[in-house]
Structures are given as structure tokens and as C-alpha cells.
Amino acid sequence: MSTVTVVASFKIREGREEEALEALRPVIEQTHDEAGCLNYALHRDKNDPSVLVLVERWTSQVALDNHFLQPYVAALGSAAADLVTEPPVVRFCDPIPMGDAMKGVL
């Protein structure tokens, strides 16, 4: 079974960036303990600091599906509705390894 990579970006309301980070902190910490979570890393867009980007890598689609069932993920969805200016952009990706075996995949 192949890994699944998720890239999700969120446009945060002006002045609510710190609140968004605090809402994400417990979700990220709990997600790191989930079976099948290889990476779950938050980034800030250098060109637009109000955009947060979450890069995730899971051992399988089953592991990712189980992640979505966690109560803290559902709670974040409710909290985030008031923090974002538009729906998140979420991409579910399959890796295409190329080049160096260590650098060509996440």
C-alpha cells in the first residue's frame, strides 16, 4: 500500500493568526501520536503570512481515513470555520518518486 500525502492551505482572517495557531497546536500534537502518521507539519506562506499550509504524510489511505474520524479533527473543523476567510484548499496526493531516492519523495 502506498503512502498518501495531503497538502492543505488555510487563509486566516486578519488578526486571528495566533488564535489559529493555538487551535492547531493540540490537533498537531495528538495527530503525531496516531498510528500511520509519518509527517504532519505546519508551515506559513512566506508571501502571505495569513496563509497556513499543513503538509501531511500517511502510511496509507486507511490511516488517513482514521485520522478524519478523530474527535479533535472534528472539533478543529468547527473552530476553524470562524478563523478562515474561505474554505481550505485540500489536495490528496500520491507520490511520484523521481531522482534521488531520499530527496524525491516526502
Image (cartoon, rainbow, N blue to C red):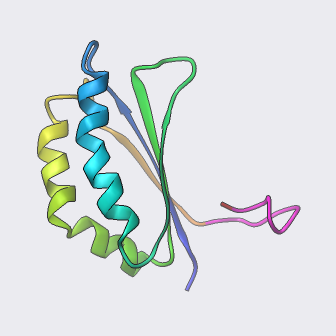
Pick whichever, 29 or 54, lies toward us.
Answer: 29
The residue segment tinted magenta is 95-105
For the point 71% across and 62% down, which residue is it? 105
- The answer to whether residue 104 shows anywhere in this view is yes
Q: Is residue 39 left or right of residue 77?
A: right
* Displayed quadrant of residue 37: bottom left
Residue 80 in the image: x percent, y percent? 19, 38
* Displayed quadrant of residue 68: bottom left
Pick whichever, 29 or 70, lies toward us.
Answer: 29
Prevailing secondary structure of the magenta residues: loop
Q: Is residue 106 above or below residue 76?
A: below
The reply to whether the magenta stretch includes residue 97 is: yes
Task: Return the residue found at the far right.
Answer: 99
The C terminus: image quadrant: bottom right
Q: Is residue 99 above or below residue 23?
A: below
Residue 28 in the image: x percent, y percent? 35, 53
The N terminus: image quadrant: bottom right
- The answer to whether residue 84 shows anywhere in this view is no
For the point 57% across and 22% down, which residue is it? 46
